[in-house]
Amino acid sequence: MTTLPINARKPHLFPKLPLPFRDAIDAYSLELKLLAMKILGMMEKALKIDGKEITELFEDGTQSMRMNYYPPCPQPEKIVTNGIYRSIEHRATVNKLKERLSIATFYNPINKEFGPAHSLVTEKSPALFRRIAAKDYFKGLFARELGGKSYLDVMRINN
């Protein structure tokens, strides 16, 4: 579900969402954007990146949420697929007695270019990853199979 910017939402897909839930999403989305920008600013400072290269990359980005509901599981100790389905890195822990709700939030830049921060690339520290338009990065990311652990290897410059 796209949460920000508000004009990118598709409320017609969720016509029966109760108004209190929509209000909660509005408030949560805006607070989470502030938190995300604060964390990105701290990353800039910790990495000694000049200017606001990271925060500017994300300031007009999109935010989306994914919510997963896990009901109580009568036998949480079992392995359901017997190893046939290989799980990706994220795994949910189920409980025999209690339900679980997981909310993941993603913040993505749009109409920008990904790559090493310009201020971190020097003669002594050359770029290890290539630059790519955000739309091309996401196109490749979502087109790949889940066999590997990281899409970042596609970005790596082979020296």
Image: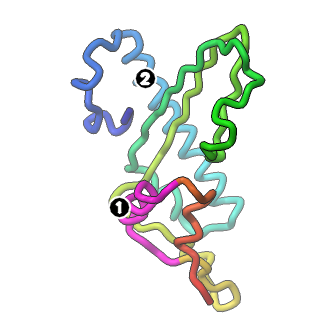
Residue 65 visible in the displayed image:
yes
The x, y position of residue 151, in whole percent, is: 55, 62
For the image, the number of numbered tags is 2
Secondary structure predominantly adopted by residues drawn in magenta = helix
Res. 87 in view:
no
| Left or right of 69, for residue 159 | right
Mark 2 or 1: the one toward you? 1
Above or below residue 3? Residue 14 is above
Q: Which mark identifies residue 135? A: 1
Q: Amino acid at mark 1?
A: Lys
Crowdedness near tag 1: few (<14), some (14–19) or many (≥20) residues, C-alpha within 10 Å: some
Residue placed most toward the observer, 50 or 118: 118
Nearest the viewer among 133 and 156 is 156
Q: Residue 64 in the image: x percent, y percent?
A: 43, 38
Residue 63 image offset from top left, x and y in percent:
43, 40
- Residue picked out by circle 2: 25
* Corner quadrant of residue 157: bottom right
Three-letter code for the amino acid on which mark 2 is drawn? Ile
- In the figure, 111 relative to 78: above or below? below
Disc 2 secondary structure class: helix
Q: Which mark is residue 144?
A: none
Kindly report the distance in space between the C-alpha atoms of the residues bearing marks 2 and 1. 26 Å
Q: Which residues are magenta?
A: 130-145
Mark 2 closeness class: few <14, some 14–19, many ≥20 residues within 10 Å: some
